[in-house]
Image (cartoon, grey):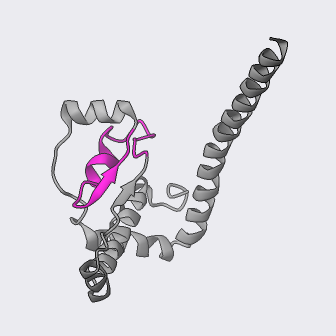
């Protein structure tokens, strides 16, 4: 999509830009006076979870996303291959708060070229849910089948 619009340099950068913006919102919410009052009463801030941040495009560095999303109070789940790559040649440095102005500019460029980030997000969310639903449904089916076999065996005894 970005290549067709003449902006190939934004490929792989928009997800990071969105994450940087989300992290800024996180900091505002959990750094607010309102939340400080909640903390005085025992509340603890939730951590940001970046989920499954492996690099799917082989033209990108295998540590592209895991490195870009390193920051305070965050948790990152990664595929084993990404973790191995990071252990081998990753550069540990907090980068999540670097380049926030560039992130805002990248998202503004998207809007200027007619790409609605909300629509793209909704589509990607739907696709991700479908990817999780199928294995979940298969798991439930396998459990039901095993339960039925177990019942049949116990009745046979």
Where does residue 135 sit, x and y in percent of width and height?
64, 37
Where does residue 7 sit, x and y in percent of width and height?
44, 60
Q: Give left or right: position of 13 versus 40.
A: right
> In terms of image quadrants, where is residue 60?
top left
Q: Give left or right: position of 43 versus 15.
A: left
> In terms of image quadrants, where is residue 152?
top right
The answer to whether residue 121 is seen in the rendering is yes
Q: Residue at x 69, y 31 (%)?
A: 143
Q: Residue at x 34, y 79 (%)?
A: 29
Q: How many marks?
A: 0
Would you say residue 7 sits in the magenta stretch? Answer: no
Which residue sits furthest bottom? 33
Q: Which residues are magenta?
A: 52-78
Instruction: Tell me if residue 84 comes above or below residue 55 in the rendering.
Output: above
Instruction: Tell me if residue 23 comes above or below residue 123 in the rendering.
Output: below
Q: Label the magenta part by its dominant secondary structure.
A: loop
> In terms of image quadrants, where is residue 81?
top left
Instruction: Tell me if residue 151 comes above or below residue 33 in the rendering.
Output: above
Where does residue 77 sit, x and y in percent of width and height?
38, 45
The answer to whether residue 116 is seen in the rendering is no
Q: Give left or right: position of 128 versus 15.
A: right
Where does residue 91 sit, x and y in percent of width and height?
17, 43
Nearer-the-camera pick, 132 or 118: 132
Which residue sits furthest top? 157
């Amino acid at each position: 999509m970005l290549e067709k619009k003449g902006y190939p340099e934004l490929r792989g950068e928009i997800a990071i830009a969105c994450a940087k913006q989300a992290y800024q919102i996180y900091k505002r919410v959990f750094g607010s006076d309102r939340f400080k009052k909640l903390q005085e009463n025992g509340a603890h801030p939730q951590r940001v979870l970046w989920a499954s941040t492996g690099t799917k495009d082989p033209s990108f560095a295998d540590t592209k996303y895991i490195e870009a999303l390193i920051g305070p109070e965050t948790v990152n789940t990664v595929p084993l291959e990404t973790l191995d790559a990071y252990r081998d040649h990753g550069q540990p440095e907090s980068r999540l708060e670097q380049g926030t102005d560039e992130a805002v500019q990248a998202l503004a460029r998207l809007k200027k070229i007619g790409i609605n980030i909300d629509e793209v997000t909704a589509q990607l969310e739907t696709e991700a849910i479908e990817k999780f639903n199928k294995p979940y449904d298969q798991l439930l089916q396998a459990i039901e089948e095993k339960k039925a076999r177990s019942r049949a065996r116990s009745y046979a005894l």
